[in-house]
Image: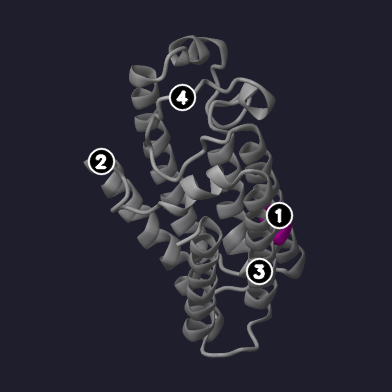
Amino acid sequence: MTVGRKAFIGATWLLLAIGLMLFVSAGSMRYWQGWIYWIIFSGAVVIVTLYFLKHDPELVARRTTAGPIAEPEMLQKVIQALASILFCAEFIIAGLGYRFGWTSVPVPLVMMGDVLVVIGFAIIFIVFMENSYAASVVRVEAEQRVISTGLYAYVRHPMYAGATLLLIGTPLALGSWWGMSVTLALCAVIVARLLDEEQRLAAELQGYDQYLQKVTFRLLPGVW
């Protein structure tokens, strides 16, 4: 199977799954917050996939191998399994919230959530342009080198920073205050993943120790 076909099959299944989780749990196709979010998310996934299939198919190939089973280390398998469960829970809780009227997020905050989702995807896109080795699993390849330019000059894990913004924006965009609790749990999982990833990179990637000394912030400049 070609990289392009594998990527689009994976993207299609992901977007269908998100749509089903949102609208089946909502019990209605009139969930307008869900539609706006799904359209933005789908558009971003398609744009990113098409761009890098053309400009960096090796990156796409690295990103298509993902999930708990793909991780070589047990700790990362557990982390990814938790992340997958919480990711799904975020959409299901938001849909149920719409169905039963659990929470009401003001429209301006819903729009702000959508903006955060777009910004999160934009950061991830920039990271992919800078780092072709941004794989979906924690591993070090023989020819891999330390990336210290672009956003990597400010924080060690800009892709996770973008993902965190996307995750924070998601419950707002979906009109779900309850979903924010799931987001906080997901952020904790991201922190656990990046801390373990740093240990792996420091042990296996030449020059990463020096990079850790040079760039002291992990996700947010001036904070942590």
User: Disc number at residue 118?
Assistant: 1
Q: Position of residue 117 (x, y in %)?
A: 66, 55
Rate crowding at label 4 as few (under 14), some (14 to 19) or many (20 or more) other CA atoms within 10 Å.
Answer: few
Looking at the magenta stretch, what is its main secondary structure? Answer: helix
Front residue of this view, candidates 78 and 126? 126
User: Disc number at residue 75?
Assistant: 2
Rate crowding at label 1 as few (under 14), some (14 to 19) or many (20 or more) other CA atoms within 10 Å.
Answer: many
Q: Is residue 207 shown left or right of residue 71?
A: right
Q: Position of residue 114 (x, y in %)?
A: 70, 61
Task: Answer whether residue 102 is visible to the viewer in this image.
Answer: no
Closer to the chain start, of discs 4 and 1, is 1
The magenta region covers 114-118
Alpha-carbon distance for marks 3 and 2? 32 Å
Alpha-carbon distance for marks 4 and 3? 38 Å
User: Disc number at residue 37?
Assistant: 3
Alpha-carbon distance for marks 2 and 4? 25 Å
Front residue of this view, candidates 84 and 90? 84
